[in-house]
Amino acid sequence: MPPTNDIPRHIAIIMDGNGRWANARGLPRRDGHRAGAESVRNAVETCRQLDVDFLTLYAFSSENWKRPQKEIDALMKLLERFLREKLPELLQQNVRFQTIGKLDMLPGKCRQQIHKAETDTRNNTGLTLILALSYGSREEITDAARALATRAAAGEIDPADIDTDLFSRHLYTANTPDPDLLIRTSGELRISNFLLWQISYSEIVISPKYWPDFRDADLRAAVDEYARRHRRFGTV
């Protein structure tokens, strides 16, 4: 394991491959999502052990609403059950739970569980677990631009004063540091509309494993790879 100063403060993960994991085993896709939930629990525990401050998981994208309704319903029920069953564990582990995305599109029961989990864990001081739900980065950036335009039109701000810091404060992630490390599973080489603004200088690690097979050793290997890299942020 790398020394503490080489541990990323914020890890973001595109959890990809649940469906293909299930298809490879002749199982329905919902079984892949259920297996993926165990990888979520494992990633949270590993990040706690590594003293990572923030873990953001791409759980459901704005584009995922285009999937078959049966699969969407299964995912929403899984989300609701996951939050209900894991809340005592989050409390015990001192994990703070947060979400980003257009939550108003989620079913009422999911929103209720999200609100309870966020409220009950808001004073926790350990790892912050962030689920990106009904999330799309282009939509997030558009919302930020709209909010700034509205404030400028109302005379609250001068358009000349809009800079990257002010823009960042209008994103869903306003109170969260940018990810140091972005991990994508399943071997796919794309970002899929995830944290486009925030990952400008993130180190990227691609794992060939499907998300349900991604476990402690794989996450630690990604952190080891991160520690071996020299982050230049545009310098030499």
Image (spheres, rainbow, N blue to C red):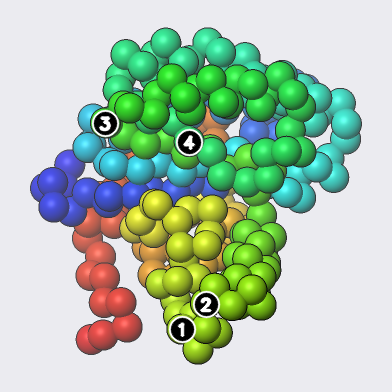
Neighbour tally class for label 4: few under 14, some 14-19, many 20 plus, Cα within 10 Å: some
Q: Which mark is residue 157?
A: 2
Callouts 1 and 2 close, C-beta under 8 Å: yes
Give the quadrant of residue 103: top right
Of residues 169 and 59, the one nearer the viewer is 169
- Quadrant in which the C terminus is drawn: bottom left
The residue indicated by pointer 1 is 161
Q: Which mark is residue 125?
A: 3
Q: Mark 2 is on which residue type?
A: Ile
**Marks 4 and 2: CB-CB under 8 Å?**
no
Where is mark 4, residue-wise? Answer: 98
**Sequence-first disc among 4 and 2:** 4
Q: Residues within 10 Å of mark 2 (few under 14, many from 20)?
A: some
C-alpha gap between disc 3 and disc 4? 13 Å
Going from N to C along the chain, the mark reached first, 1 or 4, is 4
Label disc, if present, on residue 99 of the rendered structure? none
Mark 1, other Cα within 10 Å: few <14 / some 14–19 / many ≥20: few
Locate residue 36 relative to residue 201 in the image: left or right: right
Give the amino acid at mark 4: Gln
The amino acid on which the numbered mark 3 sits, given as a three-letter code, is Thr
- Sequence order check: which comes first, mark 3 or mark 4? 4
Q: Nearer the viewer, residue 110 or 228?
A: 110
Q: Nearer the viewer, mark 1 or mark 4?
A: 1
Element type where label 2 sits in the image: loop
Q: Amino acid at mark 1?
A: Asp
Residues at marks 3 and 2, CA–CA distance in whole angstroms: 34 Å
What's the residue at 44%, 30% (across, down)?
Answer: 97
Q: Secondary structure at mark 3?
A: loop
On the image, the x and y values in percent for residue 126 come to: 27, 31
